[in-house]
Structure formats: C-alpha cells, structure tokens
Image: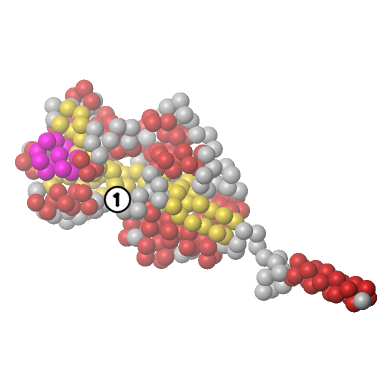
Amino acid sequence: MKKLLAFLMSMMMFAVLVAGCGGGDDKAGGKAPAQKFINIATGGTAGTYYPLGGAIADILNKNIPGCNASAQATGASIANINMLQQGQVDIAFIQNDNAYYAVNGTEMFKDKKVTNLYGLATLYPETVQIVTLAESGITDLSGVKGKRVAVGAPGSGTEANARQILAVYGVTYDDIDVQYLSFAEASSALKDGNVDVAFVTAGHPTAAIQDIATQNNVVLLPVAPDKADALIKEYPFYTKVNITANTYNNQAADCPAVAVRCMLAVTDKMDADTGYAVTKAIYSNLDRLKAAHSAANVITKESAMDGMSIPVNAGAEKFFNEK
C-alpha cells in the first residue's frame, strides 16, 4: 500500500511539473508574452474621442502580443491629464493646447505644472470656429468690440483659444461683453439673439453649428493668415486650417481658420519599446480608425508631429523618423 501511495504521489508531482513548465508556452513552444494592461482615457460617449479610443484598444489587442487594452469614457482633456498624472490611465486623448498648458504650468494649470507628460502623436485638427449670424453685420473679429461674445465655459480650452485669438486682433475682454457659455448654451443663445458671436472649438463640421445653420444664415469669421502667423509664433500648438465652402448651409466661400489638434499623450511610465509598438500598431491600421469615426480620415503618419506641443516619447519618435 505504501508503495502504491508513493507511486501515485510521484505521478501527481510529475503532472504538476509538466503543467507548470508547459502551461505558459505559446504554440511555438516559447514563453507566452507577459500581459501588458493599457488603459485609454477618451471623452464622453457621444463625442469623437470615445469611438476612436475603442478602435485603438482593438488595434493594440490584435497587434501587440500580450496586450490587454481597454478604453473608458471620461471628462476629456483636462480630466485625462489629471488621470495620466495620477497613474489611473496609460494613454489619453487630449488637445495639444491643454497639453502645452500642463507642461508649462500656464492657464488652467497655473501653479500645477505636469512635468512627466509626453506625446505619442497628434491626430486631427479641432478647429476654432467663430460663429455669428448674418443679421449681426459682423464680418471680421476687429468688429466685435462692444458685442456679446460667448467665449466657452470658464477655464476651458475654448475660453483660452478665444482670449488668445482676440488678442492678436487687439481685442481684450474689457472691449466686449463676455459670456462664459458651453457649446450647447452658446448655440441656444445665438439662435435666441442673446449673443452676437460664439467661439466653438471642435472638429468641423460641428453638430451644434449645423443645427444653427438649418434655420439661420450662419457666418464664420475668418482668422486672417497674418493674424494666424502672429498667433502661432506666440502659441506653437496652433495650426492653420481651411473651413471649405459649403461645410455649413449657405457658406459660399472658404474660411481661413486656426486649429488645435487632438493628440495622444502618455507619461514617462511608458517605456520606449512600448511607445514604438503602440504607434506602429495604430499607424499600420488606420483603416480601423477611419471605420470608427470620420474624423480619422485626415490622420496620417506624415502629420503625426504637426502641432506637437510637448516632448515626444522616445519610441514614438523612433517610429515616426523611420522611412
């Protein structure tokens, strides 16, 4: 009986050893890749960041061995920077101007500088659209003095955009009747005649402006090329864009504008090898992003450093420098 028990025990030990050695092997006979969890912070579920974040998670899971990526809805740029800093997420969608403020400790990050923020890539423009109605008679930003201007919610990226752009036209908040309104509030106020001009920073066409244009003769105020040059010289995160004719109802001509850019950011916790693998996976599968949202149609490897406002992850930089 003792011999039988000893034999059974030895067989059980052998089985455990075999399972321990072979259970973690992949099909090729090597070790399975270590699990790499990547949490992606996006924005609200109705916005652009959320579907693109889901697509990126899918791309990473399918193209990086051992990757377990997931996207989560968040409060967007400012909240995402804070989540990155606190180590709650690994990749975040943010606007490049907000990234610039964070790294330099200005605007909403005054006295709260974020020193460990790095960029992976910039994706697509988020255009600063300056909207009025034809009945206002305003055709140029220099004509807004004394007018009611919706500049965005207090402390928002849009509010900073408005202040900076007005400044290159020689207009300060002392010259206008400032209205701190969200996109939705500004849209309603324009339609109701309670504001004269509204700043909206979003990919164009923007649903809120399309809504106004269905029943009103919308006019987009241009940012002249020389004013854009002056703006970019002081704030390098801006880029020039063109809002083409017929983007909105009754828009007869192109409108020169400026834009900030949606970007992907990480912290110094992401090593160069991971940064390289992530950017390579994303830019090798752009069709998947384009299927998730039309905003991705303009994403290219060649434009990935346009408007990059902060230092770049070394692995991402290596990938984009490859021919």
The quadrant in which the N terminus is found is bottom right
Give the structural element (helix, strand or loop) at label 1.
loop
- Please state if 181 lies on the left or on the right of 234 as rendered: left
Which residues make up the magenta segment?
A: 186-197
Q: Residue at x 13, y 27 (%)?
A: 146
- Which residue extends farthest top? 174
Report the colour scheme: secondary structure
- Please state if 170 lies on the left or on the right of 284 as rendered: left
- Which residue extends farthest left? 135
Q: Residue at x 12, y 53 (%)?
A: 214
Q: Residue at x 33, y 57 (%)?
A: 295
Q: Position of residue 120 (x, y in %)?
A: 49, 49
- Could you say which is closer to the camera, residue 228 or residue 99? 99
Residue at the disc numbered 1? 203
Q: Does residue 291 appear in this view?
A: yes
- Could you say which is closer to the camera, residue 177 or residue 126? 177
